[in-house]
Every structure is written in structure tokens, then in C-alpha cells.
Image (cartoon, grey):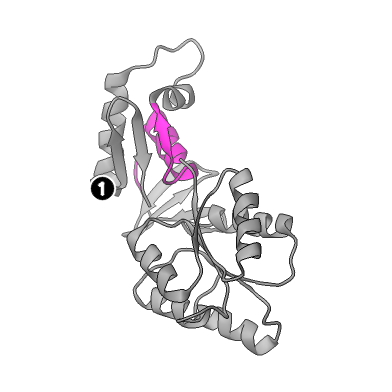
Amino acid sequence: MQRKILLLEDNLQLSDTIKQFLEHHQYEVIVAYDGYSAKNLIYEKHIDLMLLDINVPYQNGFDLLEDIRKSGDVTPAIFITSLHSVENLTKGFSVGCDDYIRKPFALRELLVRIESHLKKQFGIRENKIILWDELVYYPKEFQLTKNNQVIPLKTKETKLLNLFLENPNQLLDYQKIFDVLWDYGEEPSSGSLRTYIKTIRNIIGKEYIQTVKNIGYRFVS
């Protein structure tokens, strides 16, 4: 499943250039040209990251992001703007942006920043992934804790959780999961996989792992 990026940019030529570049790098880009349209798209669709110009019609990027953050939305947001002053930079971060890129910028730099923030989408800090309800996953140790207490998991359950967290909002087909969970020479088991899925769901919440019938599973942020 492609990551979805909302692009708010009222310069049609620049918007089209960024859109084509990101689509070439396998992102799905949803375009808006004014603040109101962008807000509607954010509330209607699942967005993985927002690229927001500031000086746009109807509602500027500062006010838009401030409203979004007040609603509890923590989707990564990067301002792309011609406003270069320290005051504007400060305001951008004060209303909740994750990054601030001054125009003109290199498309390659934009891509690097996008990829960096998407990796942090689930709160990766100091080699740990903060989930919810006091759940914390430590990738290097392959260890899940709740309220600082280790939750015991079987090896394949841990591999499965790790796979989901590495691929948020992406459809993982059965073969991909089998390749990760079962070593060479082992016989994959659909029944065992269902048991592992049930265990993970019981820990993190059933709603976060979707079953895609006859295809596989998706971990939903």
C-alpha cells in the first residue's frame, strides 16, 4: 500500500512538479490548492504526511495546522514556504509542524525529509516505538512492554508485531508474512498465523489489525 501525502500548494506548476516527483518515488499524492479544501481532505481521508504551503487562499497554512492539531490529529506535517524569517519559522513549530523547508528547495531534500518523518510516524524515539495505552516496543530487543512490564511473546509473535510496525498502513499478503515468520525449511501454517494474529490483537486492540479476505492483513495507525 502506498503512503498518502497531502500536498497543499497553490502554485500549480510547483504543485504538479512535486506531485510527479513523489509519485515517481511510489507515493500517492492528494493535491489541494486552498486551506479549506485541504482541511476537508484531511478529515475525509487517511493521510500519512502533510506538505503545507502557508500563503494559500481561504485559510493559511498556520491556521490550518493549528486547527488540525487542536482536533487531536498528529499526522506529520512539513511546511514548504517562501517565508524565510525566524519569526515565521518559530510560528510554524509553535502551531505543530514537524519540519519547515524554505523555498526554493531541492526535490531530493524534500524526499529525504519526508522519508525521515514517516519513519517516526509511530513515535520512534531513542530506539523505542511508543504505541498507546502505555505500550512501548523496543525494536533492537524485540521486546514489548506495558507500564514498564514485559509482555511475553513467542518468537513468531514478536516477528509478526515487528513486521506490522515496520509497515504501517500497508497490506501484507500471506506470502510476505510467511517469508518473515518461518525460516527456510519450515512449513508455514495458516492456522498458526491466525493464532499469532489473535494474540497480537488481544494486546494492541482488534481494530488495529485489519483482515483483507483471502489476501492478508494490514496494521492500521
Q: Position of residue 135 (x, y in %)?
A: 36, 55
Residue at the location (35% across, 71% down)? 72
> Where is mark 1, residue-wise?
207
Q: Position of residue 84 (x, y in %)?
A: 71, 82
The reply to whether the magenta stretch includes residue 153 is yes
Nearer to us in this view, 200 or 107: 107
Residue at the location (37% across, 33% down)? 157
Residue at the location (55% across, 52% down)? 119
Instruction: For label 1, count other residues whose C-alpha is less than 10 Å away and answer few (under 14), some (14-19) or many (20+).
Output: few
Three-letter amino acid code at the position of disc 1: Glu
**Picture quadrant of residue 18:** bottom right
The reply to whether the magenta stretch includes residue 162 is yes
| Relative to 67, 76 lies left or right | right
Q: Is residue 181 above or below residue 131?
A: above
Q: Is residue 221 above or below residue 39?
A: above
Q: Position of residue 208 (x, y in %)?
A: 31, 47
Q: Give SS at disc 1.
A: helix
Nearer to us in this view, 175 or 161: 175
Give the extent of the magenta segment. Answer: 150-173
Furthest-bottom residue in this view? 87
Q: Is residue 153 visible?
A: no
Q: Position of residue 92 (x, y in %)?
A: 57, 80
